Each structure stands twice: as structure tokens, then as C-alpha cells.
Amino acid sequence: MTTTAPVDRIDLTGLTVAPDQTWGAVRLVPLLRPVPITDLRLHARLHDPDELSIVHTGPRSAYVSYVPHAFVASWTTDDTPAAAYGTQLRDPAASGEPSGIRLAFRRRMARRDGKQRLRFLPLHLAMEGYLALQFGGPSIAWQEWTRHAVTRGLSPRVEASYTGTAIPGLEDALRIFEIHPDQCGMVLYVADTLAAAFVVSHPDDYRALHPTLLQDFYGELLFQYAHLYPAAPSFTARLDDTAVASVADLRAQLAQARADWAALHTVMAGGLLADERRTVTPVYRMGRFTLSRFLPAFDPDTENHIGETITDDTGQLAYLKTFRLSAAQTRRGHLLSQLAAHDWDLDATATALGTDRRGITLRLANAGFGHLLRPDIIDACRNHARKLRNQATRSQRG
């Protein structure tokens, strides 16, 4: 399935917010699921640390990445509980492997791993969707574009990220934070900036997958903020002791405190939860569940998150994993979206972005797409910008 449809918001119905925990700049907000989803289970399949994964995405294209682990989803079709695949007996004997980097070739990002099991690469499913954005390049051979742009499009597309081990404080935070009995997910903030969200269907699966959060990849903003801000403030719930005269009053105060927690973190995560311009692409159907990935509107003035979900036939969220794009990644997505909306016509795109031909040319070059434009056009624009800067400098001195 390749059709896209707008998604109003990520629905966290069935999940409740628990009090947050902080360690340095890292704030983790547990998400509890009082009634777990039992007919969809997830477990991690760890890959060799020296393995480089290559996923073929088309006849002449491939997605290349270091993949520390994959998720395997198992489900049932008769509403009976599904066992986590990791609980089944397997041969523990390990075969001898030569040392050095190995290449693992896979046919697609999400692939059946059995009759009712699906292997998919967490977050790589979403990132592949971002990298494929307008991958084909110009739809019309305008004279400004190079032959490479017309024949090969944006190949290759490359984006950088940081593993959890590179984020100061994250490893200690994940090790010491309490895991609640009903916890099925978490929202991660760094310096009170939303960095990522992770939700699964069952508390046992979250406990098994909690360590993999350190092996996931995270955006540039998370890495920078972890270095710039040493600690996040603590939010302490205050009970009005003057209003407590009975056990019922105390229960009412606690219920209000929980409601305040939920309201606070709904506001803090508003950039992810309330994005009404997000689009979703269904990837795989698993019984009554659907695996999908989503892209934001690429608005430079707001938060932009990519991610993937598994929802059931009622829309209930069973799985969620998100990645916050950096400002530079958002600008690249915004430029590509605007170019595609105007058939890659530089003048029309420049007008839509409130600039001129020189401005859009320099934006494309600064965003890493300069190789798509003829070198003489870029050189002319840079020379003109240099002359303007020199004139401004002379005027200031005068």
C-alpha cells in the first residue's frame, strides 16, 4: 500500500501519564497501559555489532545503515494472546563468523519472518521514508538542473544521527529510572525539549525493549542540548493540605495531581501529538493491525517529527517510535516539498518562499543540494552575494 492520508493527531487513548523522572538534562515520562494489548507482541532481534545492513528499496536503489537491532512483531488473528517471540525455545549455539565488517542484504524494510511474524527495523522505516522524499528529482528537465539531477535524482541521500551511547546522561538515566509495572512506553525530553516517544503493546515487551533505547539513533538537537544544559528542573506535585479532611479528599487531591501531570505533558508534547498536517503511509497489514510510517508538514517554525506506528482496526495505538528532525533536516524537507509542489521550477518555488532566484539557489546549495544545479548558476549567485557583502562592508567603514 502506498497511498497517503492525513492524520489529525497521534491518539494516546488507553495510555496514562505517570510522574516524570529526571537525571541531568534527561527527563523521562512513563506511559502506562492499564489494559495491555495481548494479541500483538514485540521483541528485539539483536544484530552483530560489526554488521552493516543494506536494504534493497528498488531496482537501482538501496538503503544502507548500521542497524544494531530489529523488532519482530508477532500477532494472532483469533484474539488469543500472542507469545513474545523471544520466549520461544531456540538453538543457543552460535556459528563461527569471520572478523571484520559484514554486509547483510535484505529485500525490504519490513519483511515477514514467519507466518504471523514481521521483522522491521525500528526508526529506519521512518527514516527511509524521509530519505525517499522527492527522491526522483526534477519531473521536468529545466535548464538549471544538471544531467545528474534529471537522470539520478537525489541519489545518494545521506543523513546523520547520534546513537544513544553518544548522548551524555542517557545511559545512566535509562539504567536508574524506575520501570512501572504497567509501563508500556515513555516520552523522552532533553532540557525539556521533546526528543522521542516510544510505545509498545505490553508491559513485558517494554521491559525487554527498554535497553534498546540506548541503541536507537537520535537527532542532533538531543545531542546538543545534552551538552549545553546540565540539568532539567524538577516538577513537584503540591497537594492542598487545607482541603484534605478525609480519605475521600485525599483521593480527590491525588486525582487532581495526576490530571495536572497529564495536562502538563500533553502541552510539552503538543508538537508531536497535535500535528494536524502529518501524513501517514501504510506499510504492512498484520491481521487487525497496520504498520505505518508518517512524515510531518516540514514547517520550519514548528517541531517536526518522523516516526512509525502500529494501530489496530479501531485506531488504538499499539506501537509508536519517533525521531525529531533537526532544523537543517526540516529545511531540507521543506525545500524538497516546495520544489515538488511547483514542478521544480526555480522561479515559482522562489516566489512561494518569498525570495528570488538567487536566494533559492543559495538555499539549495547551503542545504546540500548544490550538486543538482549547474555550477555556473551557483557560482554566479555566490559572486553576487559576495559583492553585496563587500559593498555593505565598505559602506559601514565609510
Image (cartoon, grey):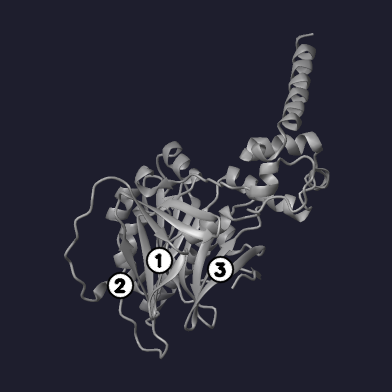
User: In the current view of this chain or complex, which residue is farthest to the top?
Assistant: 398
Count of picture labels:
3
- Distance of mark 3 from mark 1, alpha carbons? 14 Å
Residue at the image position 22 percent from the left and 54 percent from the top: 97
Label 3 vs 1, first from the N-terminus: 3
Looking at the rendered structure, the secondary structure element under dot 2 is helix
Q: Which residue is mark 3?
A: 10
Quadrant in which the N terminus appears: bottom right
Residue 44 % position (x, y): 33, 65
Looking at the rendered structure, the secondary structure element under dot 3 is loop
Dividing the picture into quadrants, the one containing residue 9 is: bottom right
Dividing the picture into quadrants, the one containing residue 206 is: bottom left
Residue at the image position 72 percent from the left and 35 percent from the top: 374
Label 1 vs 2, first from the N-terminus: 1
242 or 301, which is in the foreground?
301
Graded by Cα atoms within 10 Å as few (under 14), some (14 to 19) or many (20 or more), the crowding at tag 3 reads some
Could one spot residue 312 in this view of the protein? yes
Which dot marks residue 147? none
Which kind of residue does numbered mark 2 sit on? Asp
